[in-house]
Image: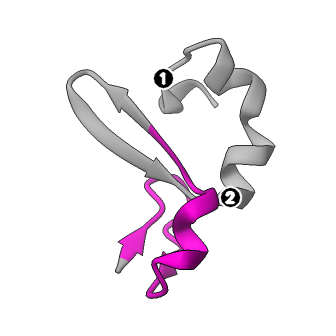
Amino acid sequence: MRTCDFCGRQEDDDAATLSWSTAVERGRTRVFCDTCSREHLRAMEGKLDSEWW
């Protein structure tokens, strides 16, 4: 089961999490669901930490 580190959404199906994104912030791997990834795309591309979104 994967959990979005931003909104807390959980997903049991591994195939459904293929569209999720990952990031490494301060040495810690973070996982974001497809909805959060789309909503905060520009911040991710700008390499802002998720605390700034």
Please name the residue that numbered disc 1 is placed on: 49
Residue type, label 1: Asp
Disc 2 crowd, CA 10 A, few/some/many (<14, 14-19, 20+): some
Residue 32 picture location, percent across and down: 53, 52
Residue 30 picture location, percent across and down: 37, 44
Residue at point 49%, 81% (across, down): 11
Please name the residue that numbered disc 2 is placed on: 34
Q: Which of the image's four quarters has the N terminus?
A: bottom left
Q: Which of the image's four quarters has the C terminus?
A: top right
Which residue is nearer to you in this view: 24 or 5? 24
Give the total of numbered labels.
Answer: 2
Residue at the bottom extreme? 12
Residue 15 picture location, percent across and down: 54, 77
Q: Is residue 1 magenta?
A: no
Question: Looking at the picture, does residue 49 appear above or below residue 12?
Answer: above
Residue at point 20%, 25% (across, down): 27
**What is the C-alpha distance between the residues marked 1 and 2?**
17 Å
The answer to whether 23 appears left or right of 33 in the picture is left
Residue at the top extreme? 46
Residue 41 picture quarter? top right
Question: Looking at the picture, does residue 35 appear above or below residue 43?
Answer: below
Residue 42 picture location, percent across and down: 76, 23
| Residue extent of the magenta highlight | 2-22
Q: Is residue 8 magenta?
A: yes
The answer to whether 38 appears left or right of 3 in the picture is right
Disc 1 crowd, CA 10 A, few/some/many (<14, 14-19, 20+): few
SS label for mark 2:
helix
